[in-house]
Image (tube, rainbow, N blue to C red):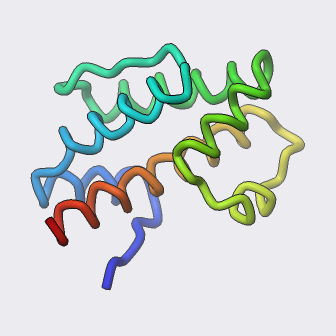
Amino acid sequence: MMQLPTSFDHLIEEANALNLYKKLILQLNKDFLLANVDLDFHEEVLPSSLKLLLHETVYRLIQEKFNEYLNLLYIIDVPEKDVKALNGDDVLELSEEVMFLILKREWQKVWFKNKYS
């Protein structure tokens, strides 16, 4: 049974431990491309840069391109109830929490593909 990571660091640790960090990056790139969001990570991107760029991108989408933001969440298949449960008062904080939801969902996909392929 899959245990979902509870923090960004926990997720990265797990991805590295299972040698799936690169696959996580490729999955992100694939879904961002599908959503027509201009963000393409290098496979060797450091987790700190990944976090920063992803956070910035989500923040910018919420602020400037809300339809693209919703489309991205739809394509990645982030559970709507999880997004609705977040407090939207502070957009900077919201975008960080959404960034983690995106990573968690992408991590699930990569983890399942790896486990059952």
| Placement of 23 over or under 80, stated as above or below | above
Residue at point 29%, 35% (across, down): 25
User: Measured along the vertical axis of the image, is residue 65 above or below residue 96?
Assistant: above
Q: Residue at x 47, y 56 (%)?
A: 105
Quadrant position of residue 48: top left
Q: Is residue 1 left or right of residue 7?
A: left
Percent across and percent down for residue 15 are: 22, 54
Q: Is residue 83 above or below residue 56?
A: below
Observer-nearest of 31 and 107 = 31
Front-lying residue, 95 or 113: 113
- State the quadrant of the N terminus: bottom left
Q: Is residue 42 left or right of residue 10?
A: left
| Image spot of residue 75 (x, y percent) | 56, 42
- Outermost residue toward the right in this view: 89
- Residue 42 percent across, percent down from the top left: 24, 20
Which residue is at 18% across, 70% downward? Answer: 115
Q: Residue at x 72, y 37 (%)?
A: 70
Q: How many marks?
A: 0
How far from the left and from the top, in percent, is residue 21?
21, 44
Q: Please state, as top left, top right, bottom left or bottom right, where the C terminus lies in the image.
A: bottom left
* Residue 42 located left or right of residue 48: left
